[in-house]
Image (spheres, coloured by chain):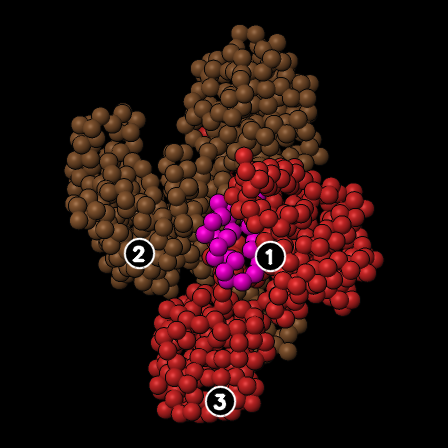
Chain colours: A red, B brown
Amino acid sequence: MSAKAEAVIDIAEYMQSVGRRARSAARAIGRARTGMKNAALLAIATAIEKATETLKAENFRDLDAGRRHGLDAALLDRLELDDARIATMAAGLREIAALPDPVGSISNLNYRPSGIQVGRMRVPLGVIGIIYESRPNVTADAAGLCLKSGNAAILRGGSEAIHSNQALSHCIHAGLAEAGLPAEVVQVIETTDRAAVGELIRMREYVDVIVPRGGKGLIERISAEARVPVIKHLHGVCHTYIDDMADLDKAVRVALNAKTQRYGTCNTMETLLVAAGVAGQVLPRLAEQYAAAGVELRGCEATRAILPDITPATEEDWEAEYLAPILAVRIVTDLDAAMDHIARYGSQHTDAIITESITRAQRFLHEVDSSSVMVNASSRFADGFEYGLGAEIGISTDKLHARGPVGLEGLTTQKFIVLGDGHIRT
Amino acid sequence: MSAKAEAVIDIAEYMQSVGRRARSAARAIGRARTGMKNAALLAIATAIEKATETLKAENFRDLDAGRRHGLDAALLDRLELDDARIATMAAGLREIAALPDPVGSISNLNYRPSGIQVGRMRVPLGVIGIIYESRPNVTADAAGLCLKSGNAAILRGGSEAIHSNQALSHCIHAGLAEAGLPAEVVQVIETTDRAAVGELIRMREYVDVIVPRGGKGLIERISAEARVPVIKHLHGVCHTYIDDMADLDKAVRVALNAKTQRYGTCNTMETLLVAAGVAGQVLPRLAEQYAAAGVELRGCEATRAILPDITPATEEDWEAEYLAPILAVRIVTDLDAAMDHIARYGSQHTDAIITESITRAQRFLHEVDSSSVMVNASSRFADGFEYGLGAEIGISTDKLHARGPVGLEGLTTQKFIVLGDGHIRT
């Protein structure tokens, strides 16, 4: 047997044992009381703070290796752990401890004509596998969210962050031990071998759901190969539609914020749709402000009749997730044309209408099939913290199970409970 | 090009056009008012009643072909449409019309510190593909549930029911037309070519979810090959645990009902677990009644010490879904041993405890990871009608999205809605 084949078998065996331990730990964390889970979260936060120097030293090894391997500046920045980022990780865990525990909540417990009571109890999913890229703070966030929601976690970070993630793993295990919970509740994969990911996404008997966090390429690859269900966030081609019944001051304010507040996020507007009736009034005002912010506009022919200096938009622009200071602009005849455009080119992430018409707002809210639909608000609000979920593990563009920002509740499911007194079915 | 290759290409093209039409119809049915959907359901019910003679004639063609192809008696029985079954189909559609419409319901609309209001709106999934076997009544049931929940449906019944299903398709289209809804809201696949199923379960751009209804073989095959999410009901290895703090009269009543009320259903008890402390008292009483009902018992060694005449149980018996008058019986030391057995051998479908202890009932409810968990009630209650869902498209043993009986709500999802007044993120 070749060395390579042997290594592959070892990875498979290693991942199987990780899976078995996770499944067994899931029962322990699933029945752990809220107080115990919170104690673990607080203890992990403290352990991370106390380990600040060690974390920086281990992170330095990753940064050093990254530089030697030619990682670009943006990637190195995401990889870096400094005092402030370490403090933010600890604070994030304390915030998760302060959130309500979703597990065990019983809803809709009602008597049925047969005499039984039927209700739904919120319960953990079981074992959650998280696959992510360079940012090591995801290790603490993801561990915290899984722990609070009563799930066992298997975390697989990027190979470029291996030393940082292993150092965080020690802090997590110290905190779990202090609270009397088994170390296997959170397992951070120790190998950088890519075969580990292939095993993780196929272990149906041990893993209940995979949450990939990272670029579109990572998520598409995992979705295509996974045999375990995936909660995925593919991409955000978000639209703002300025209706001809819009308050144009609101329209300018919101459209500017939706594009320029941050460029690299999935809830940033990528295409602006403007009703023909107000385009002549609103586009010159917007163009001036976008120019001041350094945003390049790419417009349809009608847009270029108003703004002759901008680049012509092509079919690819309507489909583009720029994640950059570029905005596609299209003039549409009315609300229906705007919704047709969104249905055809959108990614079902977040879309907004600016209008003073309640009828049109209602139609947009009901008919646009996206995970977040907004009226007179910036698409940048599509976020777990802004929505009051407390924290998020990602933003799902799937329709099943969890849609939009996924917080603690998205990491749980509901089972039916039935209470009888010797009731039988007749 | 060979005739076979040509036929395959035709099926692919046919299914693509079915998918495109369904996606387009999904927007129309998704925004249809409740009254319009109910009018369609009532019109379909009436059309089915009026077509009774035609339905029986077309069904006779299927029965005749089935007999010629040597279908067994059970299959022929499931295939048959008589006056009573046709009336039941129509009544079922009228019951669905009477259920509340889940679409558009807004929950948890709250103000956030930023000033925006965030809530969740229940919306249809989009396009639902249903794959089922011989019973033609599923055509009417599934069409009705999808229609009421605002989804477009693609229905693929068994080839043995093709004439019955096409006749039902005419009734459905007559009803949709009467209500002013497009015919493409419900499409019944017109070909018996198996390649159509292969296409249907891979059309990610046109189909949002597949619901297979049928035997374990069908569901496993579809789950393995599907590229579209599947809501599946694999199998039910349901347990009843008689605790040593049980009221033994209740225990006998419930354990008898859970096994004998019907044998072929997924919520029928397949393994009885008995606490060692009460086994000597309760097992002889139960054995007598099971014998009277014609149920064969297969027991562990401890059980056979009490009931020496029964068959010894093997490892396979603990995993068996008999769907027959056979019951595996095992004596366990206590609640923990019972829950360990269920975790190891159960199918996470429905499990019940019989006990008067509230502490043990609570532990069982919280810790047993099944889609339905019951106290002092027969597992036969695990059913959409009994739970008050009004109707069910199946019982899901998945954890994500829909768990347990899946009614109208399981065929919908929730999106976030955000209401602002020109709010921007800072």
Residue at numbered disc 3 = A287
Q: Picture coordinates of residue A283 (x, y %)? A: 45, 89
Residue at numbered disc 1 = A132
Magenta stretch in the rendered image: A206-230
Instruction: State the SS at label 1.
Output: strand
Q: Picture coordinates of residue A54 (x, y %)? A: 80, 57
Q: CA distance from mark 2 to mark 3?
A: 41 Å
Q: Picture coordinates of residue B307 (x, y %)? A: 57, 10
Q: Quadrant of residue A52?
A: bottom right
| Residue A257 versus residue B237 in the image, above or below | below
Q: Quadrant of residue B86?
A: top left
Check disc 2: other Cα within 10 Å, few if <14, some if 14-19, many if 20+: many
Instruction: Name the residue at 52% across, 86% down.
Output: A290
Instruction: Tell me which chain the residue with mark 2 is part of.
Output: B
Mark 2: amino acid: Gly
Counting residues from the start of the chain, the first of labels 3 and 1 encountered is: 1
